[in-house]
Amino acid sequence: MIKKKLIRIGLLSVMLLQISTPTVAEKHVLPPIEPVGNIPVIVPYMKYTARASTNLVIDSKGNATITASIDGYKGVTDKVSINAELQQYKNRRWIKVTSFSDSNNSHRIRIYETTKVSKGYKYRVVTKVTAIHNGDKETKTITSSEQKY
């Protein structure tokens, strides 16, 4: 009689552990992994920012197109902002050429701007994105690849 009770308790315990395990696993989110060269690097998880990017394209006529975006989490992120700065490499240092800013009381925003650049230099865009939730700010700075014109 005691043996049967112990077996039942043991089986019930195993069943309860199997039922509760998936809910614990669902709440645990692994940080994203981004490759750098051939080496995977774990990227820190951001609470209010899902994605952020910036890009620079310079055409053969010297038109530089700057794009930047931030996507917060819908229903979590209250406000987002972008400050994108076009920089020129001159005299062994990066100097500001122009900048573009925008903000939105939503969870996402995009910037798409075009400006002229001078020939014979390297350029890049340094973008600061901010996501806000209930007054708590989260900021990330991202830099585009360098483009020569």
Image: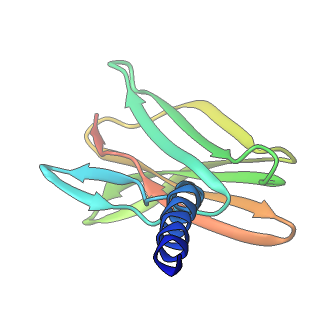
Front-most of residues 61 and 11: 11
Front-most of residues 33 and 94: 33
- The reply, left or right, for residue 71 in relation to residue 132 is left
Q: How is the image coloured?
A: rainbow
> How far across and how far down the image is residue 4, in percent?
50, 70
- The reply, left or right, for residue 48 in relation to residue 55 is right
As drawn, which residue projects farthest toward the top? 60
> How far across and how far down the image is residue 40, in percent?
22, 55
As drawn, which residue projects farthest toward the left? 38
As drawn, 63 above or below 56: above
> How far across and how far down the image is residue 92, in percent?
25, 66
What residue lies at 32% left-to-right and 45% top-to-bottom?
Answer: 145
- The reply, left or right, for residue 22 in relation to residue 146 is right
What residue lies at 76% left-to-right and 43% top-to-bottom?
Answer: 74
As drawn, 18 above or below 145: below
As drawn, which residue projects farthest toward the bottom? 2
Front-most of residues 41 and 149: 41
What residue lies at 27% left-to-right and 64% top-to-bottom?
Answer: 91
What residue lies at 48% left-to-right and 43% top-to-bottom?
Answer: 54
- The reply, left or right, for residue 123 in relation to residue 114 is left
> How far across and how far down the image is residue 130, in percent?
68, 60
Front-most of residues 25 and 12: 12
Q: How many marks?
A: 0
Residue 31: quarter of image: bottom left
As drawn, 91 above or below 116: below
Residue 49: quarter of image: bottom right
Quadrant containing the C terminus in the rendered view:
top left
